Amino acid sequence: MASMWLERLKLPLTLMVVQVIFIILFCAFIDYDDDASPAGIRPKSKAGNGTDGVVEPMEQAAEGPNSLHMYYGMFQDVHVMIFIGFGFLMMFLKRYGFSSVGLNMLISALAIQWSTIVAGLVHNHGDSFTVSVTSMLTADFASAAVLITFGALLGKTSPLQMVIITLVEIVVFAVNEYIGVEVFKAVDIGGSMFVHAFGAYFGLAVSRVLHREDVEKSQKEGSVYHSDMFAVVGSVFLWMFWPSFNSALAVEDAQHRAVLNTYFALAACCVTTFALSSVLDKHSKFDMV
């Protein structure tokens, strides 16, 4: 009886402990940035003479518009991609519809919080740091990497295993990004290297470690009509909002070019894909999957 209860409580207890740790770390290391601080006050600079956490009158208002107005629209688009686009895309397996959407939401919520903490500590060398709307964007990008990994592991892992994988991957992701951006000075606005490639190869590596020959040809691996339909809906959501994903962290004219280039590239690729789908199908029909 005790072992049965222990088995049932492993996941909820792990989640509760992890969430409590997140809250403690948020309280210990994180504060609002200037744009989010209450009007007229801001956290005292570490270079000042005051005690950490004490606030002082703001010497001068930040010039230009609040960063929330600049980035929140893009953030909302990326957020929809994470929770709706990836969520429905992961329904491609016939036996994992509800668990795909549910685990997608759980993993994303964990990754968003953990990546904010880890990335902030890594980039600030263990010191306290501030968060803003751009922190929300970068947290969503980190969760996208984990969800790409999730796509390679769907049906192979338990929820508890995915929680552990998420916690480990976010740390590796943050370190990898820090080395690429700060050491090698790599530019990756659209996340091709640090998000997509990293998430894919991390997922393949974990999948190889968890590989079992006895379930290599499982009957659960496959799709049905409605699972493919939901996966297509998820793909359309991702397709629609990809200009925002590619341009969210770019600035000024570079952001404008990123939106334009991605927008027209998506349209051209869509037409080309439909053409090739018809050519390659033996009945000359479109194949959405």
Image (cartoon, rainbow, N blue to C red):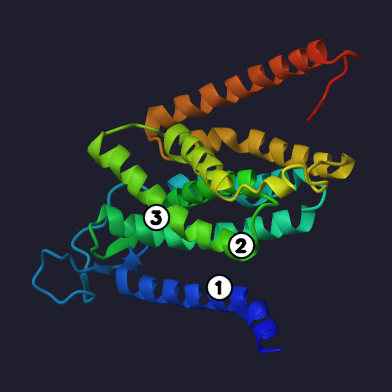
Which residue type does callout 1 highlight? Leu
- Does residue 53 sit above or below 111 in this rendering? below
Q: Residue at x 50, y 34 (%)?
A: 246
- Does residue 58 sit above or below 143 in this rendering? below
* Of the pair 250 and 253, the residue shown nearer to us: 250
Q: Secondary structure at mark 2?
A: helix
Per the rendering, the mark at residue 260 is: none
Q: Residue at x 39, y 27 (%)?
A: 253
Q: What distance separates the C-alpha of mark 3 from that of mark 2? A: 18 Å
Which residue type does callout 2 highlight? Leu
Please identify the residue farthest to the top as the structure is shown: 279
Q: Position of 108 compared to 85: left or right?
A: left
> Which residue, given by chain and number where applicable, does mark 2 sit on?
106
> Which residue, given by chain and number where applicable, does mark 3 sit on?
171
Q: Position of 7 compared to 16: left or right?
A: right
Circles 1 and 2, Cβ within 8 Å, touching? The answer is: yes
* Of the pair 112 and 2, the residue shown nearer to us: 2
> Which residue, given by chain and number where applicable, does mark 1 sit on?
15
Q: Quadrant location of residue 228?
A: top right
Q: What distance separates the C-alpha of mark 1 from that of mark 2? A: 10 Å
Name the quarter where the C terminus is drawn.
Answer: top right
Q: Residue at x 19, y 69 (%)?
A: 44
Q: Earlier in the sequence, mark 1 or mark 2?
A: 1
